[in-house]
Image (cartoon, rainbow, N blue to C red):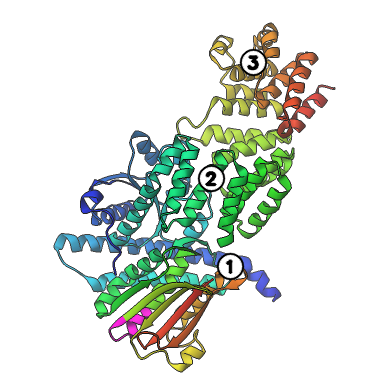
């Protein structure tokens, strides 16, 4: 354990170097994205695959940095009051092209009209990741629902695919979508309020019968 | 699936955009993105000074600023300077653009927050949604902003009560605005009750600082300190908590403690000259005259926004230079001593210059001080200028004049922040 303490300053520098590189890369992706949008507008064409590739690369970069920080307990969290409907709409907007391309319908069902204390960026990443997974496995439809119950804010993503394998339900952080779920679980756990901690549950069933992802933020 | 359009294309087309980024390619991208969302009126600035200049000339509906503006400047500083000089009304939307999400987490801990943040890369559609939401929120609170500006606090509170009944998505904002309004209206108990209501939902650091502020107003310093220690520990990026800690240290006659806190904070925000002025004050009050002079010279040289450096700043630099036994620096800070110009100045500015002139041996200053003794004796000056008078009186062996002003300061209780500095003057004078 002593050596881990010694390494702390170095790992912080590592995160800074990584952050700076990712920052530059995302700036360049922004340039590419806007030039693409301009070309689409001027030429009257649509290049959805190119858009998706850029958005996908940016998403992966962000997620890599968050994962790096989470593994070193260096991920800061900024809780602010976030209108739940905006959190859900933003996530839907981010994955919009992917769903359109895959021909999957995304239904939003927000039953809580107010704000909830959470980290908007990190909370949004959890939803985007869950929606991207659902889009890959759904047959035709995904529901993103938000409601508040006794445990806190419940965000669920349900699809009409074949559901999670039993092994994934037992060990959510392993397997194909392991990194995303690992990050989601850690982000949920960073949300602590009145002695309670956020968490994830995976299951099958729900309204659409397929995979059921639930993240609860106290 | 796509969030609804809250503004018609005609409304969106009328918005006046101001885009700021020091990287030409990024600025171009911002511009294309705004055009993609229907913007027609676009003004661009390539950095901090350019942005400040243009914002002095005209106003905009939407400001999109990159977080990194080059030359050690940031979008956060831009926002702080705009608010400091009242260059953007509450109605203007200010959105911070950044490529790295940690900035959002750091920035959200700041006292002055932009209306929103957006992370690169984003599409024109995502930008539209963020801007429209911010505009809707501005419209929701428009009347409250107006009433607060007019200092009609009761009416603002009444309006906030009506908004609370509308069951909007802005519940916490309404409570916060109410608490802030009670605070400025001089009702700390009510402000505190509202912050406590917010805290029952979540312990936001700004709500804790709000409670500490209300305690400070009521001179319940121990309660305030306990809360601020907790915020400084749990939210070290929320600098407003530490600014308030420094303020309370000054209130309690502990300028050394205040200077220590402000020195650390200033190292983190080297371009925050409001904080540097506080540091100079604390350093001077605690006898660190060299440090006070160094900091004030930095302020005079680098707080480059037009109108930022005031006569009070020049006097403060001179005060620090005199305390540091550096008459040359004091003369330089004041730009010389000209008795003929004194009559145009306000009493505090006039006496500060006369006292400084006397102490650095400027020709004519001592005579002016002596011939205007009755006027000096009868005037009531601000605490710092009173200290100048005492220093000048002691130097010219006019103990009676020094004592009369010291006693007046003691009676009002204003002496606490500068007690140690005054005490040193008497010791130095062999008294």
Q: Quadrant of residue A71?
A: bottom right
* Residue at position x 53%, y 64% in the image: A77
The answer to the question of whether label 2 and label 1 lie on touching residues, with beta carbons closer than 8 A, is no
Q: Based on the picture, tell me whether residue B283 belongs to the magenta stretch.
A: no
- Dominant SS of magenta comes to helix
Can see residue B74? no
Q: Quadrant of the C terminus of chain A?
A: bottom right
Q: SS at mark 3?
A: helix
Q: Residue at x 37, y 69 (%)?
A: A91
Identify residue for label 2: B180
Magenta region, residue range: A132-141
Q: Chain of mark 1?
A: A
Q: Position of residue A175 (x, y in %)?
A: 46, 88
Numbered circle sitting on residue B354 = 3
Q: Give the residue at the far left of this rendering.
A: A44
Would residue A198 be found to the left or right of residue A29 on screen? right
Label number found at residue A193 = 1
Dot 2 and dot 3 within a common chain: yes
- The answer to the question of whether label 3 and label 1 lie on touching residues, with beta carbons closer than 8 A, is no
- Nearest the viewer among A113 and B74 is A113
């Amino acid at each position: 354990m002593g050596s881990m303490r010694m390494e702390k300053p170095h790992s912080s520098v590592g995160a800074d170097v990584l952050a700076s590189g990712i920052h530059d890369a995302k700036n360049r992706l922004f340039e590419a994205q806007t030039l693409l949008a301009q070309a689409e507008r001027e030429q009257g064409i649509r290049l959805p695959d190119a858009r998706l590739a850029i958005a996908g690369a940016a998403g992966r970069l962000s997620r890599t940095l968050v994962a790096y920080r989470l593994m070193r307990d260096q991920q800061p969290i900024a809780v602010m009051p976030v209108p739940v409907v905006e959190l859900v709409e933003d996530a839907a907007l981010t994955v919009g092209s992917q769903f359109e391309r895959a021909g999957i319908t995304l239904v939003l069902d927000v039953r809580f009209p107010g704000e909830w204390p959470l980290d908007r960026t990190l909370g949004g990443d959890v939803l985007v990741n869950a929606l991207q997974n659902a889009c890959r496995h759904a047959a035709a439809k995904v529901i993103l629902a938000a409601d508040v119950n006794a445990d806190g804010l419940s965000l669920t993503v349900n699809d009409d695919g074949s559901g999670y394998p039993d092994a994934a339900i037992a060990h959510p952080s392993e397997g194909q979508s392991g990194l995303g779920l690992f990050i989601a679980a850690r982000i949920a756990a960073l949300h602590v309020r009145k002695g309670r901690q956020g968490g994830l549950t995976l299951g099958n069933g729900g309204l659409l019968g397929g995979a059921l992802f639930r993240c609860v933020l106290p | 699936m796509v969030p609804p359009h809250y503004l018609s294309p005609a409304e969106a087309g009328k918005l006046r955009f101001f885009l700021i980024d020091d990287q030409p390619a990024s600025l171009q991208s911002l511009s294309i993105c705004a055009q993609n969302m229907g913007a027609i009126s676009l003004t661009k600035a390539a950095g901090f000074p350019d942005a400040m200049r243009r914002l002095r000339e005209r106003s905009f509906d939407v400001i999109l600023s990159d977080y990194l503006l080059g030359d050690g400047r940031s979008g956060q500083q831009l926002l702080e300077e705009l608010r400091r000089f009242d260059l953007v009304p509450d109605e203007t939307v200010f959105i911070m653009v950044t490529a790295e999400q940690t900035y959002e987490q750091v920035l959200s801990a700041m006292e002055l927050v932009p209306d929103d943040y957006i992370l690169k890369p984003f599409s024109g559609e995502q930008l539209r949604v963020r801007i429209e939401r911010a505009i809707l929120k501005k419209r929701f609170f428009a009347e409250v902003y107006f009433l607060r500006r007019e200092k009609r606090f009761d009416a603002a509170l009444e309006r906030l009560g009506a908004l609370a009944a509308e069951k909007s998505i802005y519940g916490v904002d309404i409570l916060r605005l109410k608490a802030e309004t009670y605070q400025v209206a001089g009702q700390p108990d009510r402000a505190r009750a509202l912050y406590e209501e917010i805290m029952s939902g979540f312990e936001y650091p700004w709500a804790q600082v709000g409670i500490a502020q209300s305690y400070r107003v009521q001179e319940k310093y121990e309660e305030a300190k306990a809360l601020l220690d907790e915020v400084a520990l749990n939210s070290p990026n929320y600098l407003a908590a530490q600014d308030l800690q420094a303020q309370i240290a000054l209130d309690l006659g502990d300028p050394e403690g205040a200077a220590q806190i402000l020195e650390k904070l200033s190292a983190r925000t080297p371009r925050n000259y409001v904080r540097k002025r506080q540091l100079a004050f604390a350093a001077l009050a605690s006898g660190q005259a060299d440090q006070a002079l160094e900091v004030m010279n930095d302020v005079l040289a680098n707080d480059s926004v037009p109108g930022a450096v005031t006569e009070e700043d020049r006097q403060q630099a001179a005060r620090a230079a005199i305390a540091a036994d550096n008459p040359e620096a004091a003369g330089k800070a004041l730009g010389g001593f000209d008795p003929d110009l004194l009559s145009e100045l306000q009493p505090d500015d006039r006496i500060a210059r006369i006292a400084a002139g006397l102490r650095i041996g400027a020709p004519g200053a001592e005579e002016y001080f002596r011939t205007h003794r009755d006027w000096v004796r009868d005037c009531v000056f601000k605490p710092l200028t009173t200290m100048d008078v005492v220093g000048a009186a002691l130097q010219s062996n006019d103990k009676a004049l020094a004592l009369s002003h010291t006693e007046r300061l003691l009676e009002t209780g204003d002496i606490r922040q500068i007690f140690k500095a005054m005490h040193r003057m008497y010791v130095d004078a062999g008294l």
